Amino acid sequence: MNDQEMMNKIIDKQNISPAVIRRLPRYYRYLCELIARGQTRISSSELAKMMRVTASQIRQDLNCFGGFGQQGYGYNVNYLFAKISEILGVSAGFKAIIIGAGDLGRALVHLSMFEKRGVDIVALFDTDGEAEGKDCAGVPVYPIDQLESFCEENQVDIGVLECEKKYVKSIAQRCVDLGLKGLWNYMGVELPYSDDEIIVENIHLGDSLMILNCRVCRNDSSDKDEDTCDENQ
Amino acid sequence: MNDQEMMNKIIDKQNISPAVIRRLPRYYRYLCELIARGQTRISSSELAKMMRVTASQIRQDLNCFGGFGQQGYGYNVNYLFAKISEILGVSAGFKAIIIGAGDLGRALVHLSMFEKRGVDIVALFDTDGEAEGKDCAGVPVYPIDQLESFCEENQVDIGVLECEKKYVKSIAQRCVDLGLKGLWNYMGVELPYSDDEIIVENIHLGDSLMILNCRVCRNDSSDKDEDTCDENQ
């Protein structure tokens, strides 16, 4: 085991809390921005100001995985970015398939998001027989009944679920049976797996839209209350 | 003010915490499922089991906005669903525009998500001049320089930001200046507005993908640790 592997092992074994993991992508984005600006070091208080959190939050979060900051120097931006990228699995070389070749599935293929995060989309699977044999931005589209044979012949780590709601549960189970490591679920259907079976990460677009609606409504009504008060003055 | 308006006023004025608001869409989804099954009432403990939370969490959350449950009867599913829909602004009749007529923007127009949540997409705006004059599933596409005239002539409450990253901040500011009430931001660019200026709700697709990667990596390495232990036994 070389030094790098030893370091990774230490980071892997450290108990980074799920809450910190959920905050790391935000650090990743801000560090990207600093690198783009050519800034090579940053203090916890500067980073805190930029990210609108407290400096103590920053120190606590970054200390979780070994504390890359030095008193009076701050954080080395490139080093911190490399370490966070590593923890976030950007260099893990995961291969993903998108299941569901509808508008959203096909739109995802065109986004640079996967490539930027080190994930390679190797195939789309079509659940309604319409897109069979076509390709999408160079990614081949297969009928869903070839899911098993494809996954047995190729490295596939992650399944992105974009198929119709009625298929989600059965297709998720096929992914579990095939030994996939993760599911990225866009369909708002809750999947009952423990992390031992498969890691499930959900994107609830509809929930987010409703939260926006709700916050707008409440903001509106508090404005109205203020107006009423003004009239009474 | 009739009874319904009075009730709305009471709900509006009650201090529902942001944490509860973020949980309400999940209740909404489960209640939809119960209605589809024809179930008309449910106890807090049944709902808790289904949603894999504690019954006391359910009671606390639902008591926040008036406590619709009755001892020994449970919750009236249809009534609870109607109230939660109302709090979530499903009946608010918001009009939205999608800014950015690329693959993702156009894919969103085709999703039933907006309609189901009571949001009407009234236009797409194209930032790169390619989709000008075309329409997308019956929704007209305008060039971005018509944003101001369109919003002045039509009711627009929500802007969905799907345009290129470089345009996000300036377009968000134009939406604020136009008096839009909410921004649904897909672009991973942080917007610095307070709720007084505009409500911003972010969808960080890239962050979610990285969290999935990270959780898969950590799951992988903990499996490997277990294997190592087994070999040593």
Image (tube, coloured by chain):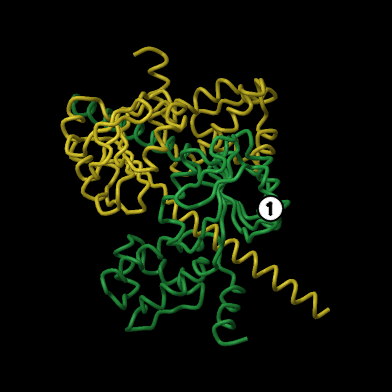
Chain colours: A yellow, B green
Quadrant housing residue B154: bottom right
Left or right: residue B82 versus residue B151 is left
**What residue occupies the far bottom of the structure in this picture?**
B2
Q: Position of residue A156 (x, y in %)?
A: 27, 29
Q: Position of residue B6 (x, y in %)?
A: 59, 83
**Residue beneath label 1, please?**
B194
**Chain where mark 1 sits:** B
- What is the number of callouts on the image? 1
**Frontmost residue, B196 versus A164:** A164
Q: Position of residue B220 (x, y in %)?
A: 30, 31
Question: Which residue is at 24% across, 43% downward?
Answer: A127
Position of the N terminus of chain B by quadrant = bottom right
Position of the C terminus of chain B by quadrant = top left
Q: Position of residue B201 (x, y in %)?
A: 56, 51
User: What amino acid is labelled 1 in the image?
Assistant: Ser
**What residue occupies the far front of the structure in this picture?**
B133
Is the residue A136 above or below the residue B46 in the image?
A: above
Q: Secondary structure at mark 1?
A: loop
**Frontmost residue, A226 versus B211:** A226
Quadrant housing residue A87: top left
Quadrant housing residue A184: top left
**What residue occupies the far top of the structure in this picture?**
A2
Query: Within 10 Å of the Cα at label 1, are there few (<14), some (14-19), or many (20+) other Cα atoms?
Result: few
Question: Which residue is at 66% across, 55% downward?
Answer: B151
